[in-house]
Amino acid sequence: MNKPDQVRELLENAVPHLKRNPDSLHIFVEAGSVYATGAGLNLSFEYQFNLVIVATDYPEHADRIIVPLLAWCRTNQPELLMNPDRRNGFRFRAEQLNHTTCDIEITLQLTERVCVTKVDGGVNVEHLPEPPDYDDDPTIDWELIWLKEGIDG
């Protein structure tokens, strides 16, 4: 899995407190499963898991963590933001420790697609990027054309 390391790197670079105190950032993978159809004896699969992010003794506003994660999700797990059925895909809770610090726990429901292909008697394993968001691509002009006998369009 690549996304846990990507999230750690993102937060350590984007959040000043976590950059200065990397030991206060904890990343866990929970409720993981592998989804594979086995269609055509294909070994490709998808990781499905909850990524749990915990920042301990955190003295800054939660926005400093949430906003970079939202930006990361926009590219790396866009359905968390755009699919109403995934409204529980980005959850958090916090424990106020005192007047200046808290522990923040964020849970993201993530997936990672993995393509496995045969190559020269072995296998090649490639982690695939998220499918592109065609709604944001101004170079694609979508047009729906109905073709049915007897109906002029």
Image: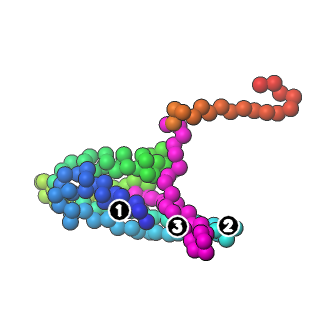
Earlier residue among tags 1 and 2: 1
Q: Residues within 10 Å of mark 3 (few under 14, many from 20)?
A: few
Count of numbered labels shown in the rendering = 3
Separation of residues labelled 3 and 1 (CA atoms): 18 Å
**Residue at image x 34%, y 50%?**
69
In the rendered image, residue 78, in percent from the top left (x then y), is placed at: 46, 48
Q: Name the residue that disc number 1 marks.
A: 5
Q: Residues within 10 Å of mark 1 (few under 14, many from 20)?
A: few
Earlier residue among tags 3 and 1: 1
Could you tell me which secondary element the residue under label 3 belongs to?
strand
Separation of residues labelled 1 and 2 (CA atoms): 30 Å
Q: Quadrant of the C terminus?
A: top right
Q: Is residue 44 on the magenta stretch?
A: no
From the viewer's perspective, is 89 left or right of 116?
left
In the rendered image, residue 52, in percent from the top left (x then y), is placed at: 35, 63
The numbered mark at residue 125 is 3
From the viewer's perspective, is 153 left or right of 118?
right
Q: Nearer the viewer, mark 3 or mark 1?
A: 3
**Residue at image x 35%, y 62%?**
5
The numbered mark at residue 127 is none
Q: In the image, what residue type sits under mark 2?
A: Ala
Magenta-highlighted residues:
108-136
Q: In the image, what residue type sits under mark 3?
A: Val
Q: Splitting the image into 4 quarters, where does residue 134 fall?
A: top right
Could you tell me which secondary element the residue under label 2 belongs to?
helix
Q: Nearer the viewer, residue 103 or 55?
A: 55
Label the magenta part by its dominant secondary structure: strand
**Residue at image x 53%, y 49%?**
131
Q: Splitting the image into 4 quarters, where does residue 31 fall?
A: bottom left
Q: Name the residue that disc number 2 marks.
A: 39
Could you tell me which secondary element the residue under label 1 belongs to?
helix
In the rendered image, residue 147, in percent from the top left (x then y), is placed at: 79, 33
